[in-house]
Image (cartoon, rainbow, N blue to C red):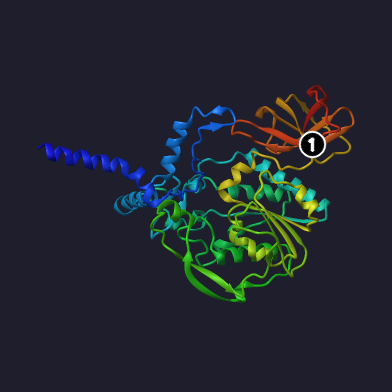
Amino acid sequence: MKNKYRIYIALFILICLFPSAGLLLSGVEQSSENRETAKAPVLMNVEGINVHVLSDAGAWFEDHFAFRNECVTGYALLLGKLFGVSAQTGVITGTDGWLFYKDSLEDFQGTGQMTQRQLFDVAHTMAMIQEYANNNGAEFAFMIAPNKNSLYREYMPYYYQPFRTNKSNMERLKPYLQAERVNYIDLYERLRSENEILYHKRDSHWNNEGAAMAADEILTCMGLEHPSYADRSCTVRKDFQGDLDRMLYPAAIENEEEIYYEPSPQFAYCEKTQSNFDPKISTRSNGTGSLVMYRDSFGNALLPYLAEVFEQAYFSRALPYQMQDLTTRQADTLLIERAERFLPDMAKEAPYMEAPAVKPAVDGTIVEPVDLQIVNQGEYTKVTGNIPASQLTTNSRIFVKIGEDLCYEAFPVSPADDQEGFSLLLPADICPTQGSAITIILSES
């Protein structure tokens, strides 16, 4: 009996030691999840002794223990094959091997709807950016990259039914953009009209064919000459690894087919680039004109097809949008691309751009702002505040009057679902430090 207990105890100890002792054999495991993992613990920091060193060590170990990816994969395969559900909170297991990003579920089911005011905030902000671009000699366009389940909902699991009583935020935003006369390029209508599958099954983004088609729609709508990839020959290689696949099955990734055009887009990077998801990328080619583009991860595959067309191009993932890039790079084209699932975020933050001056000062209703903040930001002073929702209509524009003579239009923002507000950057040398010299005016014009 005693020998049997010793065996049980020894096995228990071995199992407990396996994740940590295994680090000597496998090395430090790097998590494949789409998040920032815990950093290695340090005993001393800038404040002296790190009193959280033990909790930091625990967090680091959870993200890096031996054979972590194999354990994550085994658990995911067990749940996926046996019960048809996802082991990752951020991934939805669909039918026929399809995977979907769970952040798109609210759009798919019609929950988390943006308010009419938030839709106006986004549309009017794009209109203000468009006016800024036009005043600086640049053409402007805004486009939305559709969620994968917006185009291929038939592969979503049956227990996630689309809620179609209301339209999606993308569909509801379109008339607001039209009313603001924003140059909006409807990629959803173009992509859904095609019979081909234009997104990866195990990734959250479009494939190269989808990206080339999106680029063709963008350039055609802007009247820019460009090569047609539909006329180019292509090869298909099974060498693509999806981001959702890496998250769910890090030790059992299934390569997908990807299309490669021949010849490939002709351009060069201006600096060393690790991947097309780098925060800032500059390119050059034998094309014409100059481009500044603000984009998210959908821009990874889109970048080559646009870079080929412009002699100089700059692609940025900066948030908020740094509008000075347009003038410092003397670009003649400004593009903004945003994934459908990020539309609510666009209503929460204004671009980094000097507020447009208004002459003469507008007439309207004077309101008392809530939580007025005046913060120095180098060459600018940032002024923000909230306005009671009861005093705003859907299309209220917000103006800020400084003293008796100066007036500027603020960007409308909704920093939270229950807040309506404004944000603007003013030249530091003209902005007062006392809120009493600031007047907030609402106008319906």
Q: Residue 115 is drawn in which quadrant?
A: top right
**Rendered-image quadrant of the N terminus:** top left
Q: Residue 396 is drawn in which quadrant?
A: top right
Query: Residue 117 location in percent, x, y?
Result: 65, 38
At horizontal 77% and vertical 37% (from top left) the residue drawn is 425
**Rendered-image quadrant of the C terminus:** top right
In-front residue for pair 45/188: 45
Question: Which residue, given by chain and number where applicable, does mark 1 sit on?
Answer: 380
At horizontal 81% and vertical 56% (from top left) the residue drawn is 330
Query: Residue 303 location in percent, x, y?
Result: 64, 61
What secondary structure is found at the residue carrying circle 1?
Answer: strand
| Residue 67 seen anywhere in this rendered image of the structure | no
Query: Residue 41 location in percent, x, y?
Result: 49, 37
Task: State left or right for residue 435 relative to residue 76.
Answer: right
Task: State left or right for residue 360 relative to residue 384.
Answer: right
At horizontal 43% and vertical 48% (from top left) the residue drawn is 28
